Structures are given as structure tokens and as C-alpha cells.
Image: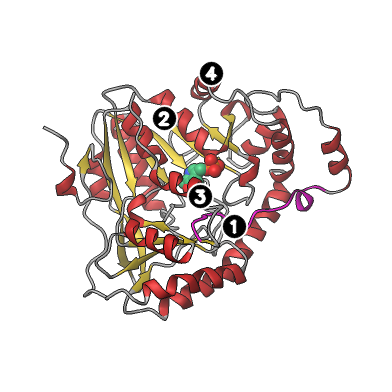
Amino acid sequence: MRIEPFKMERMQSRYENYVDCNLSESGVHPMRVSELLEGDDRRRLFEAELGYSQSNGTEELRGRIAAFYDGAGVENVLVTNGGSEANFAAFWALLEPGDRVAYMLPNYLQTWGLARAFADRTDAFRLVRRRDGGAERWALDVAGLERAVGKRTRIILVTNPNNPTGAVLNEAEMDAVVRAARRVGATIVADEIYRGAEVAGSTTPTFWGRYDRVLITSGLSKAFGLPGLRIGWVVGPPKVVESLWSRRDYTTIAPGVLSDRLARVALEPARREAIFSRTRGIIRANLPVVEQWIRRRGNLLDHVPPQAGAIVFVAYHAGVRSSALAERLRVEHSVLICPGDQFGLDRYIRIGFGSDPEALRRGLQRLEPILDGLKPLRRAAAGPPAGRSRGRSPSRPAAARRPPG
Ligand SMILES: Cc1ncc(COP(=O)(O)O)c(C=O)c1O
């Protein structure tokens, strides 16, 4: 099996702790252990034995995760090390050579790499910028989705709320995904790790309960602001969950015992909602700072306001590739952002705005010398059309992504 480098994660792993300003992070400023634990809980943590924890997650933790999904029980839940292990286990268990994966772009491309390693092809469908009424939003290209789903499609992968755009699918779009999956008997893998981090309104609806072949992958790293716990999960039909669990016997075996314990605290329903309020508070305070900064550069930059997540996907109208731009920003000004081509859409950058406002302002200032020095191009329509391809790079236009032969 050949696995390609996961470029975005490689870049972050290598540089995020070595730059002065890190705007590459997609979560909010993390919580401290002391914010999570009070009174007796603190004492109990210190007394915990550091043995192996229950391998699929303690029953109490699985129960608390299940409570976040109407109708789910402990038998529907597998606890993993981070959302990334949840995605890995799902793709490893479900895919066989010859299968195809219909894949939402732009996206966090972990599962793109996994699909290309475990299956035969990835068939892209896109979120596209569209004006519905007055406001512009990232809308699902339903015709593109229909084209991407064929009889060999084993998985339809959606990230909702989406990374990097912060878009949330509406009910009609969720129905379209379910319809396409049902047509061919595919499994929907819905990465919902940003659910709970909404800018406004209520918690994003889940795909859970809309169709019998749904696997939800998620975790505590984004909407909960607890990435250091490395707790993720899969919610799915018991048989599938069981088969994913047996795969984990070969990877990390069990979640850390302290992480399982702290996760139980974070997922107690009232606590969970309080943590979401903290996250939403940070997002609501910081989004105007970054949006004002974007608007001041209206001849070069524009964006569709995110509906969820501490991330904004910013289009720039200049003739430089986004990974080259990101590299210059890092090398010359020690500021890290994520280039759009690492999400499958070039001429965009993703700015994470979940840190404290002062750090955010400092980081934005560091972007200015290079961005303000770019020569603005005439405005073009955003985003290449949907394509169907094994595609070496998901950010290339469809015509350049024909499969070999
Ligand atoms: C959509 C999505 N899924 C999964 C992950 C990985 O999550 P974790 O850090 O919990 O492994 C990320 C991280 O950025 C993400 O954006």
C-alpha cells in the first residue's frame, strides 16, 4: 500500500511550534485541566491508576458520547485517539481495492489520502460559492455530487460543518447526500468534529439517524477546545463499530486512561453545552476582528462568512500559488497559515482565529507586508468545477486531473 504525504498536517507538525504567530490552527484556544476539573474530580484524577483503560472507551464515556446523538446507545460508539484515528479506522475497515470514494471538496484531506491508499479512486464533488437571496454561501453542488456517486462508490465523505470553509449543509443538501448514498448503497462518513462551534444559531444537525449506513466521526479537538486529550469517536451501527474496534487492536489499542476520565467530565450534557458556549464566545469575539481586516483589503481579499469553526477561508485575487504564498509568510515573517491548495482549492488561504484577540491581531499584522505587496488581479469566479478523477492533486482543475491511461 502506498500512502501519500498528508501535506497540511506535515506542514503543521513541522512548523506550528516554531513560528512566532500560528494562525494555522482550526480550533479555539484550548482549555486548561483546571478549568475542566473542580473539587472531588481533581482529587480523583490524582488518584487514578495509570493502567490500560477500557479499549473501546469506558461505558460511561460511550454513554455520554451517545447522548449527543438521538437514539444512539453505548453499542453504537467506539472511542478513538482523536478524530483522525476515527477517520483512519473507518476508511481502513470499509474500503477494498476497486472501491471508490465520493469526496467533498474543499476539505481536510486526511481521508483523501486514505481513500487513495485503500480504494481505487476518489471522485470529487464540490461546495461552490452561490448567492441564495442576498447572502453568499458555500452551497453543495448537487449535480456534481450525483455525478461523483456511481455503483462502485463505497463511501460518501462529507465534513459538516466544513473545514476549511466553515459552511454548514442545509436540510435539502443533507437530503441530497442521503439520496445519493441510498441510490448505490454507499456509507456516508460524516466528519462532524466542528459540530457545536457555530457562529450563530443552534447546534448543527447531525447525519446520525437519517439513513442506516451512516458513520459519524468526531472528537474533542475542535468544538470542545480539548485537542490535547486526543479523544475522538465513531458512532455507527453496532456491527460496523465492532469491526472498527477490532482494527484498533492493531493501532493504539485504547484511549489514555486520564483522557477517558477528563472526556467523561467534558461530555456530561450540561458541561458539554457550557464548553460549546465558551467556544462560541471566542468565535463571536474574534470573527469581527479578522473580517474587518479582510474588508480593509477589499481589492485583494474576500470571503464567505463562516457558519461554524474558528476558521475563515479567504480568497485572494493575485497570481501566486497558495502554498508558495504560505511558505513566504512563514520564512520571511514567521507566521503560519494554511494554504488553500492543501484543502483542494488554490488561491485561498485559511486563517485560524481561535487564539486570544491580541495574538490574532499580531498574526494578522505579520501577514500585511506580503499580502499588501501582491498585485491584485481582475476578479474571477471562485473554484474550479467538480471533477471525477483519481487526481494526484485535488486542487488542480478537473481537466488536469484525468486518471492515467
Ligand atoms: C475535519 C477534521 N477532522 C479530523 C481532524 C483531526 O482531529 P484530531 O486532532 O481529533 O485527530 C481535523 C483536524 O484539523 C479536522 O479538521
Q: Earlier in the sequence, mark 1 or mark 4?
A: 1
Is residue 106 something one can see in this rendering? no
Label 2 Cα crowd, 10 Å radius (few <14 / some 14-19 / many 20+): many
The spot of residue 353 in percent (x, y) is: 53, 64
Disc 3, SS: loop
Q: Which residue is mark 1?
A: 28
For the N terminus, which image quadrant? Answer: top left
Q: Quadrant of residue 138?
A: bottom left
Question: Residues under labels 4 and 3: Cα distance?
Answer: 29 Å
Q: Tell me the mark number nearer the camera, choosing from 3 and 2.
A: 2
Are the two marked residues, 3 and 1, in contact with CB atoms closer than 8 angstroms? no
Are the two marked residues, 4 and 3, in contact with CB atoms closer than 8 angstroms? no
Q: Earlier in the sequence, mark 4 or mark 3?
A: 3
Q: Is mark 1 within 8 Å of ligand 1?
A: no
Which amino acid type is shown beneath numbered disc 4? Answer: Ser
Which amino acid type is shown beneath numbered disc 2? Answer: Phe
Residue sitting at 55 percent across and 62 percent down?
Answer: 20
Which numbered disc covers residue 91? 2
Q: Which residue is mark 3?
A: 205
The spot of residue 349 in percent (x, y) is: 38, 61
Disc 4, SS: helix
The spot of residue 253 in percent (x, y) is: 60, 23
Q: Earlier in the sequence, mark 3 or mark 2?
A: 2
Q: Which residues are magenta?
A: 23-37
The spot of residue 131 in percent (x, y) is: 31, 68
Label 1 Cα crowd, 10 Å radius (few <14 / some 14-19 / many 20+): many
Q: Which residue is mark 4?
A: 246
Which amino acid type is shown beneath numbered disc 3? Answer: Pro
Residue 197 versus residue 297 in the image, above or below: above
